[in-house]
Image (cartoon, grey):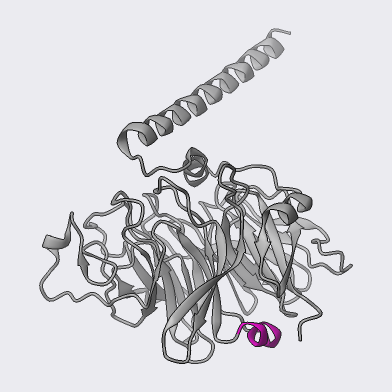
Amino acid sequence: MNKQLHREHGGASLRLIGITLILLIVGAVVLFRLYVSPQVGDFRVILNAIFGVGVETPEESRLRETLSIDRRFELGIFAADLPNARWLQVTDRDDVLVSRPRKGDVVLLHADADSDGRSDGRETLLTELNMPHGIALIDDWLYVAEQDAIGRIRFDHQSRSVAGPFQRILSGLPGGGNHWAKNIALGPDGWLYFNVGSSCNVCIEDDHRRGSLMRVRPDGSDPEIYAAGLRNATGFDWAPWDKSLYAADISRDLLGDDYPADELNLVVEGGFYGWPYVNEFGDSDPDLGAKKPADLQAIDPVLAIPAHTTPLGLHFPRHERLIEAFPRSAFMALHGSWNRSVPDGYRLEQLIWNGDGSISSQTVLDGFWTGDDLIGRPVDIEEDSVGNLYLSDDYGGAVYRLQLRSDLP
């Protein structure tokens, strides 16, 4: 009896401590918004970014009422009740893998075999990982990028199972800090590419790997910096028409609502892209611009993205139906702002490579920010073997499916 009372008392104490901590955090965010940075638009975004706090997945009826979507697509909820759903990967049998860094796991969503628009089931493949984020499938290996390491485990696509130990092939990567999340992807040259974000808003890093894109061989050998000056280039992919590497980079904060622009960069080996000394198209940073080494020349972005909209997932379509509907295009998920007095982002964009060499954009999916309510934050985009797109949402805890309409000409 006394032990039971002790457990109940201990549980109540822990709950009280948790509630107190949440109230203190919310209070600190409100004070920060009011007195330190009036550019903070919504404290819910801060809580989502720091702790992965979100909301229940909206009902499809709410999404239909609230969201606007490109006429070429139909939107549905492929999987709900997935708090902190972040990066995606599609298997050979069209199951969808989802990383959940705050949960420390990787979840497998079964393909929609019964054609009702929803995943047919789910299972957790990996647990107890250190903030797992990026996912890649190479042959019969499942690769996962933790915040300080890259590891792999044997994976059977058909049986949906992993086997053997999780092997960390590259350890000692800089983790923590402002930008811990790492994406990984296999490049056309056979190397495994990954980003290492900055530890800060703007600073000169002690670890030169911070603020870069790196690559390593799939067995973990020969890690090297591929390009530098990229503050937080989590979203990157290769254009299928010429194998060029593009990366969406999130620029620094606390210089006003509309400056500096986030960036799309054409990344070349050995290139330097500005951070922390240069913003936008050659602008000297007000804090660190004067400290830029004279022999360091920054490559301009190929597209300015609205400031603080936070580009994350970047995906060039490969399926012929998607390419036919969206020629010479990529899809980019804007996770949404915290450092704006009026929130912006929270949408899916189509980037278009025009015949004159310019790149333009138009919105494919919008409305997660309603003007007074926030119902979702897009994160990553992938496609399956029949041309469906999948979009993760770490705030609404969901994976959505965007299916091309059957009545397209």
Q: Is residue 231 left or right of residue 76?
A: left
Residue 93 visible in the shown view:
yes
Q: Is residue 320 magenta?
A: yes
The main secondary structure of the magenta stretch is: helix
Q: How many marks?
A: 0
Q: Residue at x 63, y 69 (%)?
A: 89
Q: Residue 162 appears in which quarter of the rendering? A: bottom right
Residue 315 visible in the shown view:
no
Q: Is residue 372 left or right of residue 201?
A: right
Range covered by the magenta-colored residues = 319-326
Q: Position of residue 296 (x, y in %)?
A: 17, 74
Q: Is residue 390 magenta?
A: no
- Residue at the extreme top of the image, as rendered: 2
Q: Residue at x 63, y 20 (%)?
A: 11
Q: Position of residue 155 (x, y in %)?
A: 67, 70
Q: Position of residue 80 (x, y in %)?
A: 73, 52
Q: Residue at x 20, y 60 (%)?
A: 285
Vertical arrangement, residue 295 with respect to residue 284, above or below: below
302 or 28: which is nearer to us? 302
216 or 134: which is nearer to us? 134
